[in-house]
Amino acid sequence: MGEIAEIPSPGVPLAFGQVGAPAAVLVPDAYGRLPWLEPYAAALADRARLRVLVPDLYQGVATDDAEEAERLLSSFSPESSLGEVLAAVAETRMQGSARVGLVGFGTGGRIALLAAQDGAADAVVAYDATLDADEHAVLPAPVLLQLAEIAEWLPGADPEGFVDRLRDHGTPVTRHDYVGARPGFANATAGDAFDARTAALAFARTAVFLDDRLHD
């Protein structure tokens, strides 16, 4: 790709799994809805017995170039992205999903955590994402953090502080740190951090976490 490009089904969430089953909404990272998210969503729908939606946060475009990803990220407001995620959650609930989880990657992980603070989710998985002390409020859903070992965090957003705040608020939290991994280790389409073995382990843990918390 190497530049901003149009994607299939612009502005429409991709859907996998059985309508009415417990659901998960996948929130893309800064590169947008790239092809790797489709097999991830299909496998999650099968493995965790879920209805899975993948919204388009960039309204029809995506990129596999890091600089272009930064430009895209800066051109769309967090409020717009949050609105797309909440709309996808609402769609699954209108279709009969009694419980809904969120799975976000990178900047999408941050959006997923913010959405969960609003009570939108029954469980949330965040890859390479936390909330800083200023934006963090009570998060009323179990949290799974999937974190690359080799990562830099902004002041106030370090995982240790975030986990401590979650526990202080009574939020159940599970944290996995992946030795030698870099942020973006799950993205098989863009960037140079993809790690197939680490991605597979993190996926398996995500599937078990959501299966346990979204099903009776």
Image (cartoon, grey):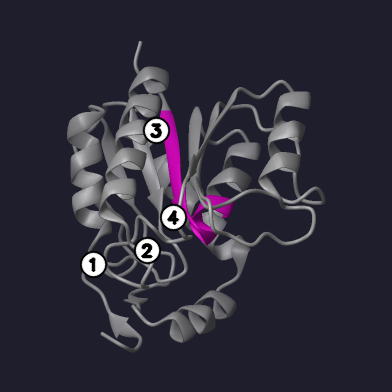
Q: For the residues carrying marks 4 and 1, which lies nearer the camera in this image?
A: 4
Labels 1 & 2 near each other (Cβ < 8 A): yes
The residue at which mark 4 appears reads as: 181
- The residue nearer to you, when weighing 210 against 146, is 146
Q: Residues within 10 Å of mark 2 (few under 14, many from 20)?
A: many
Task: Give the mark nearer the N terminus: 4 vs 1.
Answer: 1
- Examine the rendered structure and indicate whether residue 27 appears above or below residue 194: above
Task: Give the mark nearer the N terminus: 4 vs 2.
Answer: 2
Residue 43: x %, y % from top left = 19, 41
Q: Residues within 10 Å of mark 3 (few under 14, many from 20)?
A: some
Q: CA distance from mark 1 to mark 2?
A: 9 Å
Q: CA distance from mark 3 to mark 2?
A: 18 Å
Task: Give the mark nearer the N terminus: 3 vs 4.
Answer: 3
Residue range corresponding to the magenta coloring: 100-110
The residue at which mark 1 appears reads as: 9
The residue at which mark 2 appears reads as: 56
- Examine the rendered structure and indicate whether residue 213 appears above or below residue 150: above
- The residue nearer to you, when weighing 152 against 59, is 152
Hey, what amino acid is under mark 3? Answer: Arg
Label 1 residue SS:
loop
Labels 4 & 1 near each other (Cβ < 8 A): no
The residue at which mark 3 appears reads as: 93
Q: CA distance from mark 4 to mark 2?
A: 27 Å
- Examine the rendered structure and indicate whether residue 76 appears above or below residue 137: below
Residue 63: x %, y % from top left = 35, 79
Displayed quadrant of residue 34: bottom left
- Examine the rendered structure and indicate whether residue 27 appears above or below residue 46: below
Label 2 residue SS:
loop
Residue 96: x %, y % from top left = 32, 27
Hey, what amino acid is under mark 2? Answer: Asp
